[in-house]
Amino acid sequence: MKNITKLIFFFLIFSTNVFAENKCVRSEINSLNDTVIGNIQQRKVGIKNVLEGRGGDSSLIWNVFGHNFDYLKTNQYIKNLEIINKDSKGISPEYEFLSNCLKELKLTRKYNNLVKLSREYNNLKIDLLKKNLLLNNTIKLSIDSNSAIPSLAKEINDEYSKLQSLKREIEKDLARNESKVIEEDSSKEVTFYKNSLLKLKLELLKVKGLYNRNLQQKIEYFNLKSLKLANLSSTYNESDVQAIESHFIEVEKIWKEVTRQNFYDLIKSVLIFDLPKIPESFTGEVSDSEELRKDRASLISFRKETISDLTKKKEEELKLLNNLLIQINSLRSNYYNKISFEFLSGRIFTYSYFGSLKNEVYASPYRVLNYIYSKYLFVNEKVSLGREGITSLSLIILKYIFIILSLLSLRLVLNKAHGYLDRKNRSLINRRNRAKVYRYLTTIWNKHSENFLSISWLIILSCISYFKLLENISIILDICIVFIIAKTIRSIVILFLSSVSLIDTRNYKNFREKAEDTAGRFATIYLVYSLIMVFLNLTVGKVYIYSIVKVIAILYSFYQVMEASSTWSDEFNKYTEKKFSGVIVDKIERFYKFLPKKLQAIFSLIFISILTSMDIFIKATENFAISKKISANLFKKQIESVEVEDGADEKIPLEYKDKFSFKSLELEDHYVDHTQEIEAGIKEEVVEWLEGKSEEHSVVVHGDKGIGKTTLLKKVIKDLGSEHGENLNFIYTKVPSKTIDKDKAFKFIEESLGFEEEGSFDLYRLDKKLEKKTVLVIDEAQNLFLSHTKGFSAYNALINMINLSTENIFWVLSFNKYSWLYLDRAFGRSQFFRNIFALKGWDDNAIKDLILKRHKSSTYKLSYDLLINATRSQDEMDRYTTIEAKFFKLLWELSRGNPRAALYLWMTSLSKRNSKTFNVHIPKDADLDSLDKLGDDIFFVVADVLKHENLSPSEIESTTNLPKGIVRNAIKVGQERNFFFKDEQGRYMIEISSQYGLIKYLRSKNFIYGN
């Protein structure tokens, strides 16, 4: 029973504690808030000081970087802070409890202040991270250095005090032992032995003291230089070129001072620590022999500690020196890359410049030697520690042996995997009726199987490097990666050369030898260049020698590539002629005439590489609009000389032209099914209204002129009529231009519904008279307004009619896109219409169907011979399918997917070859050059016509408020430049051929808005 009582008591206490921990106590929260706000403000001041170049306490900005900061992930850190600002109002996870409690306790003012300060603090963090990224991690290195030096200095001072105290104790012991020798003759040998041990320990203490003083001086020196560098980095301003140049000179001075440190003497002086040896054990028979044995064992242990301590001090000194050199090289390289050419050219061939070059050469081995020496010290320390140290060293060696064995095992696994995949590939090749994906995979394997092992090792080593699994030998990993990439380049070059060469059994051997030689050259070029750059970056940094050697290496590499390419000049020319011919190649060939033969070859190589890459990209993304646009424009360049002669359209028979008129759907066979989703959406809205499932009784369709609004609406009426004709009546009507009077709008609706009423207009009365539910389709509804003071009464009347609760009328309206966008901005749409459908441009397949369906209904044939000849394609497939597909992609691109524009452009691309055949040329696009030379008044008028779709001259005057003369001149220029089309009623519309070019220009100049 007692145990149960204790258990219940414990549970109650625990529950109370949990409740107390989760409860927001006002007094505690107020205190916590004051502390947090104070910390944030202090840290803000620290970051601002660094950003503004005033230096500051590194502890205040250490929190920005944290303990495990990875410079390579800086952009991710910035992104995380931006997400916190956006999603959490700037409240980072460590302040969430405080934030929630402030909200719970309704301390609104304090909560808002926390949000404001947190967001400001995060923004300052982002600015600091960006600046550190700009300075190649210099700020972080400065913080590390400035943080490490004070703690190390304190540690040295404390140790110095302990050494002095221990030294005094030993001196006292020596004095006491000397007095014992005088008093007791029998203990002389024992006392001498004890004194020798004490003197040896005193000598060890002196050595430790010497190293301490030396390191203390180094710390003071390094601290001074590190603080100077931190100040220079904090005042960095990328836009202030003069300040960068002056700072570069300051950094150069510090760099020269540091590199003048005698590294060689530093290393030589302690390759073997000159420490006294421990005397042999005391051999005499004395009563206190056990004490002597313990003293000797203690001294042996102290000697080992001394060796370990001296090793650590040398490592600390080298570490400080290395960190300072990294900091200097990083800042120096960054400034060097930002200084102006004038400043740099003024220093070339000066005494200072040659002095810097000499200093870089002199300093180049230091970091490597320091690295090697630090490893020597590490091994020397382990060996000096005896069995314990050798055991530790053996474990490290075993670790690397295990890694090597793992890599060898992995090599075996990869070889097995390669063999398995090769066998699988052969079985797939022998299989009949392979799926397309298998044919694709076998083709890839046959081409790249040789690179399987190289690419696999490249991925493995890159992962090892990324996750820092072998950080101590990262340079070896980098070199291994360079060698693997060189091997892969060799294989890729051979593959590339085989694709541009005509190979058969007679010339295969010669090709192989020639390709091996060329591939070896390319691989060697990459290998030498990369290894030199790695070595220079490791040793001297990216400044004078690095820049000079890099330029020389690039020039030498270019020369080698040029020499290697020149041996393949004939193969490149033949391949270019076959694969990438046409106008582009003609221009390239004309350019080649001005170049030496060896340069021609390398430019051919570059040209083939670029176009091959683009071809691969287009094929890989052929279903994306961007690839289709690139393909279309490349094809246009190839065939730009194949234009239709003036007057060719007059020879096209009228019956053929009629098939490509701009009329909406008349023949079912001509209809292109491309708007299924919109058709289904409109029909669904109508059916739901008919069945009483929805009270919504209006739909809006909008799109560019010629996009197919009328055809779509007629198709919807036809489909609904076949499905619901017994219950629905359909009325299609167009709004006359421009019906802007309210009474005329009433009359138009009344007549559209089939009534002629006398007296005032009453839609409810008309609605009740309808015998069946009626779908009223009002096309070209943009004719119900003009954009001036009294021009919206008809449109407003229509809106009011639609918003009445009629039972038998379903409204379907179509608007020109830019009329709709204008009305939407002027009046809003959500309060009037819920169901809005936007018609977009057609895709290239739909445009192709549009043209070919109409063409196939004629008796004429098409010939693409002129286009084939223009491209000079030797590929049999290009003669039939590819050229046709490329042509219709071009037609789609020029028409922007507008079917009416596509029909117009199709007719401009034809010429009569004979009585039954048409030649296909490049479509004749509108000439819209030199638009910038025209006045703004002209484009103001063009934008006004676009907004209304059609206007008369007087309507243009009233909607633009421009004088009559300016309007008349704009119309005249527009007609001359083919901007405007004038219909039979004397109304002006945008010419379909110029529509998209004008829209693009008007949008760029902010005459119109919307996409």
Image (cartoon, rainbow, N blue to C red):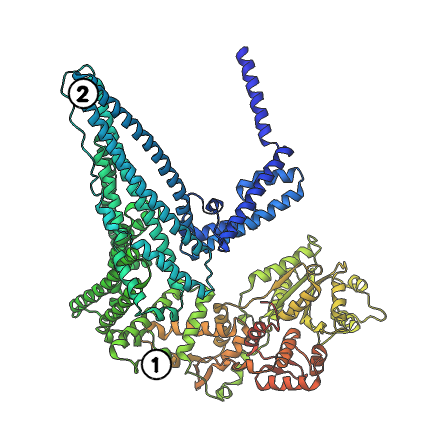
**Up-down: is 402 above or below 624?**
above
Sequence-earlier tag: 1 or 2? 2
- Quarter of the C terminus within the rendering: bottom right
x and y percentages locating residue 335 in the rendered image: 39, 61
Is residue 418 among the parts visible in the rendering?
A: no
x and y percentages locating residue 430 in the rendered image: 25, 56
- Quarter of the N terminus within the rendering: top right
- Residue matched to label 1: 586
Secondary-structure class at tag 2? helix
* Foreground pick, 129 / 144: 144
* Foreground pick, 423 / 939: 939
**Up-down: is 428 above or below 637?**
above
Q: Residues within 10 Å of mark 1 (few under 14, many from 20)?
A: few
Left or right: 365 as drawn, with respect to 52: left
Q: Residue at x 72, y 82 (%)?
A: 954
Quick check: marks 1 and 2 in contact, CB under 8 Å? Answer: no
- Residue matched to label 2: 190
x and y percentages locating residue 362 in the rendered image: 25, 58
Q: Residues within 10 Å of mark 2 (few under 14, many from 20)?
A: some
**Up-down: is 281 above or below 260?**
above
The quarter of the displayed image where residue 738 is located: bottom right
Viewer-nearest of labels 1 and 2? 2
The quarter of the displayed image where residue 763 is located: bottom right
Kindly give the residue lying farthest to the front in the view shown. 182
* Foreground pick, 404 / 337: 337
* Foreground pick, 81 / 301: 301
| Res. 608 mark | none
Secondary-structure class at tag 1? helix
Which residue type carries mark 2?
Val
